[in-house]
Image (tube, rainbow, N blue to C red):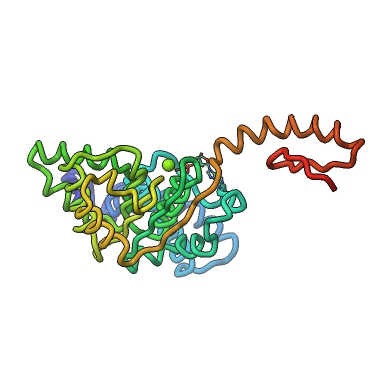
């Protein structure tokens, strides 16, 4: 209920008022904005093409359904609070050969969310972990799942604040309800004992209830340095890795490669010119010279 009801002055049925005005009013109340926007145009098209009434109605309703789905995807994307919207369309798999492309494309079907499985992306800075996490998050939004994106540091900060303000339970329930939680950048900032405990609780409460994606620059054996306690790290990994897909993303920083690639291509152009006379080949990636 919207709380809005037909005012007394608004005639109902067909007693008075132009049908267009009434129709607009009723369609707004029924929340059918696409029908309202399109009914006249589609009616003209159907009259022109000799389409009968049931098919006219079907066309209109289908338009409303398509639009409604699009609006819901947009709403889920907004609610997810992605720092940027990224997809696999702009991801270059050849730049990161350690990454299992088949597995990633399978994960992009979002069935792991349905199965409440987790994903952990491990790799050094700039290797594309956040990009992959964002793209998996976007795919899940498009498939109809609720998603929340955060960083480990921001999440811990939020949890501590909620605890201080005595609304931790509500936040924990909200975090539990989301179908896919993305926790980016575990490992950059060491956590306080309380922070680590609260983060552990989040993973623990989501265990077998929802999917979690974690990205980290640290291999598992170094997670203790972030979480502080070996016991807690063990318990956390136990839950997180029970149903998990691990993405190994060890490669050069895409950012560095892009900028140094530009510099190197200028340098290697020069070197290639110099070496043309001797018959040496220059590797365009590394700028190294190999004798042919
Ligand atoms: P990480 O989270 O591992 O530090 P990011 O995902 O933030 O790395 O990647 C750094 C930048 O490089 C981002 O702008 C990202 O979109 C881009 N990037 C990284 N890897 C790739 C790739 N394989 N194809 C296209 N863009 C990439
Ligand atoms: Mg990142």
Q: Relative to 270, is 139 on the left or the right?
A: left
Q: Residue at x 45, y 66 (%)?
A: 58
Identified at 44% across, 40% down, the residue is 84
Residue at the image point whose x is 43% and y is 48% from the top: 134
In which quadrant of the rendered view does residue 166 lie? Answer: top left
On the image, the x and y values in percent for residue 65 come to: 41, 60
Tell me: 54 left or right of 272: left
| Outermost residue, right side | 277
Furthest residue in direction left, as rendered: 166
Viewer-closest of 282 and 96: 282
Residue farthest toward the front in the current orientation of the protein: 291
Give the total number of marks visible in the rendering. Answer: 0
Q: Is residue 39 above or below residue 83?
A: below
Relative vertical location of residue 232 with respect to residue 191 in this rendering, above or below? below
Report x, y in % for residue 174. 20, 51
In the figure, is residue 292 to the left or right of 142? right
Foreground of the two, 46 or 219: 219
Please provide percent x and percent y for residue 157.
Answer: 22, 37
* Closest to the observer, 209 or 38: 209
Q: Position of residue 265 (x, y in %)?
A: 72, 34
- Position of 98 relative to 3 (above/below): below
Let me know if residue 266 appears in the view: yes
Residue 23 shows in this picture: no
- Taking the spot 28% from the left edge, 43% from the top edge, the residue there is 226
């Amino acid at each position: 209920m919207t709380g809005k009801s037909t005012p007394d002055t608004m005639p109902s049925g067909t007693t008075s008022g132009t049908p267009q005005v009434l129709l607009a009013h009723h369609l707004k109340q029924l929340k059918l904005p696409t029908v309202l926007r399109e009914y006249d145009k589609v009616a003209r098209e159907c009259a022109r093409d000799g389409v009968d009434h049931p098919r006219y109605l079907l066309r209109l309703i289908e338009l409303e359904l398509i639009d409604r789905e699009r609006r819901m995807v947009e709403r889920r994307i907004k609610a997810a609070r992605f720092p940027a919207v990224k997809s696999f369309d702009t991801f270059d798999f050849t730049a990161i050969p350690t990454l299992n492309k088949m597995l990633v494309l399978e994960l992009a079907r979002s069935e792991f969310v349905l199965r409440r499985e987790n994903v952990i992306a491990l790799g050094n800075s700039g290797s594309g972990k956040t990009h992959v996490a964002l793209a998996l998050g976007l795919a899940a939004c498009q498939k109809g799942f609720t998603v929340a994106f955060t960083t480990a540091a921001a999440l811990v900060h939020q949890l501590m604040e909620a605890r201080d303000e005595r609304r931790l339970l509500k936040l924990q329930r909200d975090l539990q309800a989301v179908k896919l939680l993305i926790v980016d950048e575990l490992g950059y900032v060491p956590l306080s004992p309380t922070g680590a405990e609260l983060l552990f609780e989040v993973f623990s409460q989501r265990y077998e209830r929802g999917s979690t994606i974690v990205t980290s620059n640290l291999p598992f054996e170094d997670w203790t340095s972030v979480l502080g306690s070996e016991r807690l790290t063990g318990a956390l990994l136990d839950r997180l890795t029970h149903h998990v897909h691990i993405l190994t993303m060890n490669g050069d920083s895409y950012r560095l490669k892009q900028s140094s690639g530009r510099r190197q291509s200028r340098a290697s152009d020069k070197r290639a010119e110099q070496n043309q006379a001797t018959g040496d080949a220059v590797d365009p990636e590394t700028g190294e010279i190999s004798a042919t």
